[in-house]
Image (cartoon, helix red, strand yellow):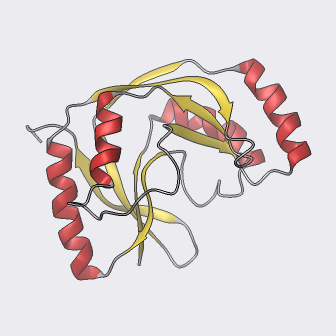
Amino acid sequence: MNYGIVIFPTKKLQDEANSYRKRYDPHYALIPPHLTLKNVFSADDTQITEIAEKISKIAAKYEPFTLKAYKISSFQPVNNVIHFKVESTPELEGLYKDMHSADFMGEEPEYAFIPHITIAQKLSNDEHSDVFGSLRMQGIDHEETVDRFHLLYQLENGSWTVYETFRLGKDC
């Protein structure tokens, strides 16, 4: 089965992201707006139990932190993805690093970690240019506290749902 690890922002930021995603993101109906900590990976029932235990230990290492989305940006020319850029924090960097360490699953990520929430993807070059040109003028300025993240699994129809939620901090 396919799994992934994400942070879901508050409803306010999700609503703002979805106002763009419903028009510009073909994955709109499959998963809510999110910040990816670990991309899709496969595991069986036994493996996911062990992975969940490791994730729980990782979550305990980090206290809740502030997530700040501060501009609309793009990954072009690598790909035509438009996103809310999220300020990097020691907690975000640490979570990401731990999710990709040899102790966890040891897989090297495909791309460098750039914290973001996707609002448009799979656009043609012309669409990307037009959409990005208008969206970056609007900008974003949002701040919230993150106190949890989620292990998701993929359903047969391609959509994603929560398998388990992990609260940050030693007291949880």
Nearer-the-camera pick, 16 or 115: 115
Nearer-the-camera pick, 20 or 114: 114
Task: Report whether 64 appears left or right of 150.
Answer: left
Nearer-the-camera pick, 63 or 113: 113
User: Residue at left 25%, top 30%?
Assistant: 64
Residue 132, by quadrant, is top right
Task: Report whether 45 appears left or right of 130.
Answer: left
Determine the residue located farthest toward the left in the rendered image: 171
Q: Quadrant of the C terminus?
A: top left
Q: Does 19 appear above or below 105?
A: above
Q: Does 148 appear above or below 38?
A: above
Task: Report whether 160 appears left or right of 93.
Answer: right
User: Residue at left 83%, top 28%?
Assistant: 133
Name the spot of residue 94 as percent of width and height, x first. Answer: 28, 39
Name the spot of residue 24 as percent of width and height, x first. Answer: 76, 46
User: Residue at left 45%, top 56%?
Assistant: 109
Name the spot of residue 12 as percent of width and height, x first. Answer: 52, 30
Q: Quadrant of the N terminus?
A: bottom left
Q: Does 108 appear above or below 85?
A: below
Q: Does 83 appear above or below 96?
A: above
Task: Report whether 145 appears left or right of 126.
Answer: left
User: Residue at left 48%, top 37%?
Assistant: 115
Residue 102, by quadrant, is bottom left
Determine the residue located farthest toward the right in the rendered image: 126
Counting labels gives 0
Name the spot of residue 18 as percent of width and height, x first. Answer: 64, 41
